[in-house]
Amino acid sequence: GAPRAPRARTVAEALLTNRLNPGKATAEEVLACIPISEADKARARVAVEHPARALLETRPVLSPAECARVRRWAVPRMDTRTPDTVDGAPECQVTVPEEVLRTLIAPETLAALL
C-alpha cells in the first residue's frame, strides 16, 4: 500500500531532532505541529500561498544604533525559562512600552512604527 503520512507529532520531532530537513516538510505538516487557532493557521496559509501579501512593508525602520539600544534594553528582560505558547521554544520576547521606546529611538522612527 501507499506510505502513510507521518503524524504531526512525528513531523515535529523529526524537525526538532534534525531527522527531517525543514525544506522537505510541507507547510501543512508544520502547521499541524503548532498549537495555534484555525484562524491563525488560515493566515499562515495565505502567507505561504501568496508571500507578497504577507508583508505590508519591507524597508528597515530602525537604524542600526536604534536596534542596538532596543536590544540592550530588551535582552535582560527576556524570560528564556517560559515556553512560547505558539512553538514551545523559549519565549525570548518582551513588550517594550511606548514610553520606554520613546527614550530608545528617534521621534520620526517611533512615528513610522505607530
Image: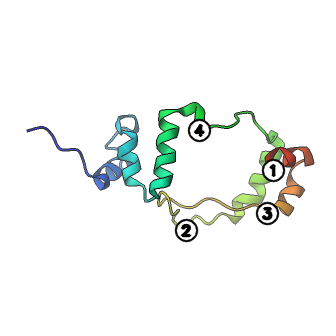
* Res. 8 mark: none
Indicate the secondary structure of the residue bearing disc 2.
loop
Residue that badge 3 annotates? 97
Q: Position of residue 13 (x, y in %)?
A: 33, 53
Q: Dot 2, how many residues are within 10 Å of its Cα: few (below 14), some (14-19), or many (20+)?
A: few
Which of the marked residues, 2 or 1, is nearer the chain's N terminus? 2
Residue 102 lies in quadrant: bottom right
How many numbered marks does the figure carry? 4
Residue in the picture at 46% in, 58% down? 36
Q: Nearer the viewer, mark 2 or mark 3?
A: 3
* Res. 81 mark: 2
Which of the marked residues, 1 or 4, is nearer the chain's N terminus? 4
Which of the marked residues, 2 or 3, is nearer the chain's N terminus? 2
Contact check, label 1 and label 3, Cβ < 8 Å? no
* Res. 114 mark: 1
Residue that badge 4 annotates? 54
Q: Nearer the viewer, mark 1 or mark 3?
A: 1
Q: Nearer the viewer, mark 2 or mark 4?
A: 4
Which of the marked residues, 4 or 3, is nearer the chain's N terminus? 4
Which of the marked residues, 1 or 3, is nearer the chain's N terminus? 3
108 sits to left or right of 63: right
Q: Dot 4, how many residues are within 10 Å of its Cα: few (below 14), some (14-19), or many (20+)?
A: some
